[in-house]
Image (tube, rainbow, N blue to C red):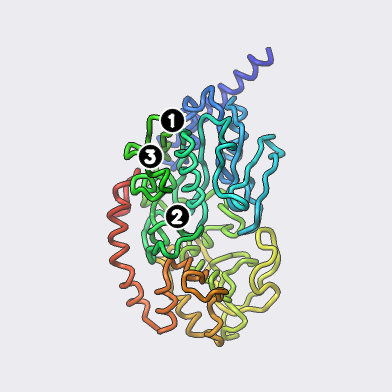
């Protein structure tokens, strides 16, 4: 009787999800792939599932893991990225393995001692599932985690299903393209800072362009499958296009609390490689920037300790700079479909201690400067020091941007903005 009642409840949940998806499609409401349970539940039936997810993997207000468990999916292990499975850790904080108290599933951290699942981690897994809300900016480490996860799936012959989500910055492409000599976890591939692709599209590009590990490249085929078990299935969002200005229902990380921060992230994360505050410890990280060494006539703020930024740069110090936050409409107008480097240029021009504007590396090698890892080259730093104009800096990006856009077009799953 209990089993029958449970089956009825599970059926009602599935039918409700299908009904909601149909309503969304009729109304042209953008629907993340996770909501489209009727599309991917058959792929998980009678399978042992390993899921890579964080707090953004939801169906409505319910975490995907909790929804899948109610639907009878056998989840055997979860993998956690930066900020952890429930998304509460500080940026860069080491995450340890643990048992998730809500679901009872063992969680293996892929941000700390290791960045990819081992063969032992995947031994009892039949199929892998990936669902994380990305923001479409190269520094955001979830695309680096995605690459490691794909490589592990290929090398261990496990099928991988990606539940795609809309890209809130997917309506333009801009910024310097990374030189692979500056490759790091905040930039692993030759893509611009804002690359205009969803997680699913980017995954196809990683495989199609053979940007994976040597072993994974050898084992994968252009069809994204091989005879030993790996396959890539991307479940698409409904009603999404690259013209959409999708507003995230859940903050993707502790320091991207609203759309102002999300839109400014691609432009102002550069300040993480400087001695200035990038706004952590304020209400609007990446939309508020400054330093005690900028003119006191500018906007004043003081970074404080808070959840997700317990020890922010310049904590407790009165800073001067700019508050660029605002409504979605006003911020989009400021961004104007471009990486806005004018604040970086202004900050360098006004900074009273230019010798210490950039965080120094111990080795003093250009490839070791954090600013250069964020920029993806050392050219931008040298251009700022030389006083090169914004127009000339942008012009220097164009050849590689043009080449990237040609590659990008091959892997788009949704109608493009151009």
Indicate left or right for 409 with 324 as reference.
Answer: left
Seen from the viewer's position, the closer of residues 315 and 273 is 273
Q: Earlier in the sequence, mark 2 or mark 1?
A: 2
Identify the element where label 2 is drawn: loop
The location of residue 330, given as percent across then percent down, is 46, 65
Identify the element where label 1 is drawn: loop
Label 3: few (<14), some or many (≥20) within 10 Å? many
* Residue 290 tag number: none
Q: Residue at x 47, y 30 (%)?
A: 40
Seen from the viewer's position, the closer of residues 415 and 148 is 148
Q: Which residue reaches farthest bottom?
A: 352
The residue mark sitting in front, 2 or 1, is 1
Identify the element where label 3 is drawn: loop
Indicate left or right for 345 with 7 as reference.
Answer: left
The location of residue 379, given as percent across then percent down, is 40, 74
Seen from the viewer's position, the closer of residues 86 and 35 is 86
Q: How many marks?
A: 3
Asked if disc 3 and disc 1 are in contact, CB closer than 8 Å, the reply is: no
Vertical position of residue 20 compared to residue 180: above or below:
above
Indicate left or right for 31 with 402 as reference.
Answer: right
Q: Which residue reaches farthest top?
A: 1
* Residue 136 tag number: 2
Vertical position of residue 357 compared to residue 219: above or below:
below
Q: Residue at x 49, y 52 (%)?
A: 144
Q: Quadrant of residue 319?
A: bottom right
* Residue 229 tag number: 1
Q: Earlier in the sequence, mark 3 or mark 1?
A: 3
Read off the residue under disc 3.
Answer: 220
C-alpha distance separating marks 3 and 1: 10 Å
């Amino acid at each position: 009787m209990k089993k029958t009642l449970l089956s009825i409840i599970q059926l009602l949940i599935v039918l409700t999800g299908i009904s909601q998806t149909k309503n969304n499609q009729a109304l042209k409401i953008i629907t993340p792939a996770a909501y489209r349970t009727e599309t991917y539940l058959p792929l998980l039936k009678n399978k042992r599932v390993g899921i890579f997810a964080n707090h953004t993997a939801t169906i409505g207000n319910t975490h995907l893991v909790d929804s899948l468990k109610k639907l009878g999916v056998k989840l055997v292990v979860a993998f956690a990225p930066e900020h952890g499975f429930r998304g509460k850790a500080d940026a860069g904080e080491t995450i340890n393995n643990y048992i998730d108290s809500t679901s009872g599933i063992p969680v293996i951290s892929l941000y700390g001692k290791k960045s990819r699942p081992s063969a032992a981690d995947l031994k009892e897994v039949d199929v892998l599932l990936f669902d994380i809300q990305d923001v479409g900016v190269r520094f955001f480490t979830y695309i680096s985690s995605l690459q490691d996860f794909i490589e592990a799936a290929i090398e261990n012959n496990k099928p991988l299903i990606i539940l795609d989500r809309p890209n809130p910055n997917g309506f333009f492409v801009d910024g310097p393209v990374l030189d692979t000599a500056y490759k790091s976890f905040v930039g692993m591939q030759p893509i611009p800072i804002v690359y205009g692709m969803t997680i699913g599209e980017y995954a196809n590009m990683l495989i199609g362009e053979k940007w994976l590990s040597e072993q994974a490249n050898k084992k994968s085929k252009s069809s994204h499958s091989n005879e030993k078990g790996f396959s890539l299935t991307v479940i698409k969002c409904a009603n999404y296009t690259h013209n959409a200005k999708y507003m995230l229902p859940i903050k993707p990380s502790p320091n991207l609390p609203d759309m102002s921060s999300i839109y400014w992230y691609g432009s102002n994360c550069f300040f993480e490689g400087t001695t200035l505050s990038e706004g952590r410890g304020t209400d609007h990280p990446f939309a508020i920037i400054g330093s005690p060494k900028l003119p006191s006539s500018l906007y004043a703020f003081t970074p404080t300790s808070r959840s997700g930024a317990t020890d922010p740069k310049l904590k407790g110090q009165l800073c001067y700079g700019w508050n660029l936050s605002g409504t979605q409409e006003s911020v989009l107008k400021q961004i104007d479909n471009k990486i806005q480097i004018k604040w970086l240029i202004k900050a360098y021009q006004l900074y009273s201690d230019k010798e210490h504007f950039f965080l120094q590396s111990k080795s003093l090698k250009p490839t070791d400067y954090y600013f250069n890892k964020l920029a993806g080259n050392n050219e931008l730093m040298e251009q700022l020091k030389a006083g090169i104009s914004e127009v000339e800096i942008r012009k220097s990006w164009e050849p590689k941007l043009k080449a990237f856009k040609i590659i990008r077009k091959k892997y788009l799953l949704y109608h493009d903005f151009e």
